[in-house]
Image: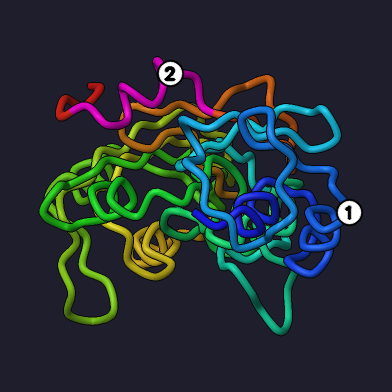
Amino acid sequence: MRLDKLLAHCGFGTRKEVKQLIKNGYVKVNGEVIKKDKHHVDPVGDKVYVDDERIHYQEYVYYMLNKPAGYVSATEDNVYPTVIDLIEENYRQDLFPVGRLDVDTEGLLLITNDGVLAHQLLSPKKHCPKVYYAKIQGVVTDDDVQTFLSGVVIDNEYQCQSAHLKILSTTQNHSEIEVEIYEGKFHQVKKMFHAVGKEVIYLKRIRMKNLNLDENLELGAYRPLTDEELDRLKSETVLQ
C-alpha cells in the first residue's frame, strides 16, 4: 500500500495533508525517515510512525451501532443524515451498513467494510434471522401468531416466509411483541402487521443472527464487536 494512502486511511488527514506530513519528515518506516509519498509499505508487517506515534492498521473493522430514528441506513443521502455520519472513524471511506433499517426504526445495525461477511448475512440463501421488538396499535392474538407462522401475505400477492411472533404483553388497545423474520423486504414487519389489521407504532431490531444488541449501548452510540461476537456472527450455527 502507498504510504500516503495508509496514513489517510488511518485518519491523519486528506491525501494532500498526509503528503505534506511525509514531505516535512514526520513519517518513519522501520526507523527510517521517508519523504516520498509514493513509498510502498506493508501495513501489517512494517513499523510505521507519524511523529513517533505507531500506526496500527486494520484491514476490516466491525462496529455495533444502536441506530436512532431519523437516520437513514445508507452511506449518503440528500434528505436525511446517514448512519455513517454517526461513526467518528468515517474517514474510512469504505464503511457501510449491513442491510437497512427504516429511517424511523431503531436498534442493532452492523457497520463494516467486510463485503464478504455482509453478503453472507444478507444472502437470501442463508436465511439469516433478525429479531425485532415492537409496540403495536391493536391487540395481537394467538390467531396472529399462527398467521405469522403460516406466512403472512403482503403487497397483495407475496407470501412471507414463516415468522415467529411472541406476544409480550397486551392492553385494551396496544400490544408489545417480539418477531423473528428471515427476510428483509421493504417495510416488511410493518406490512405484516398491517396485513392482520394492526399498525406498528415503534420498531427496534434487537438481534441479527447470533449478534444481540448491547443493552448498555445508548441510541446513536457504537462500539467495536468483540472477538467472541465476531466469531459467533461468522459461525454457521444460529441462536435459537
Q: In this view, does 20 lie to the left or right of 112?
A: right
Within 10 Å of disc 2 (Cα), the crowding (few <14, some 14-19, many 20+) is: few
Front residue of this view, candidates 32 and 85: 32
Q: What stretch is highlighted in magenta?
A: 225-235
Q: Which residue lies furthest to the top in this view?
A: 228
Q: Residue at x 88, y 53 (%)?
A: 24
Q: Which residue is drawn at 73% across and 59% down?
A: 85
Q: Name the residue under label 2.
A: 227
Tell me: residue 211, above or below residue 143: above
Q: Are marks 2 and 1 in contact (CB under 8 Å)?
A: no
* Residue 229 is one of the magenta-drawn residues: yes
Quarter of the picture containing the C terminus is top left
Q: Residue at x 47, y 60 (%)?
A: 100
Front residue of this view, candidates 71 and 202: 71
Residue 73, by quadrant, is bottom right
Q: Name the residue under label 1.
A: 24
Which kind of residue does numbered mark 2 sit on?
Asp
Tell me: residue 15, above or below residue 138: below
Q: Is residue 141 left or right of residue 65?
A: left
Q: Position of residue 131 (x, y in %)?
A: 38, 38
Q: Is mark 1 on a helix, strand or loop?
A: loop
Which kind of residue does numbered mark 1 sit on?
Asn
Q: Which residue is drawn at 78% across and 58% down?
A: 18
* Residue 196 is one of the magenta-drawn residues: no
Counting residues from the N terminus, which is met first, the one under dot 2 or under dot 1? Answer: 1
Q: Where is residue 28 in the image (x, y as percent from the top left)?
A: 72, 37
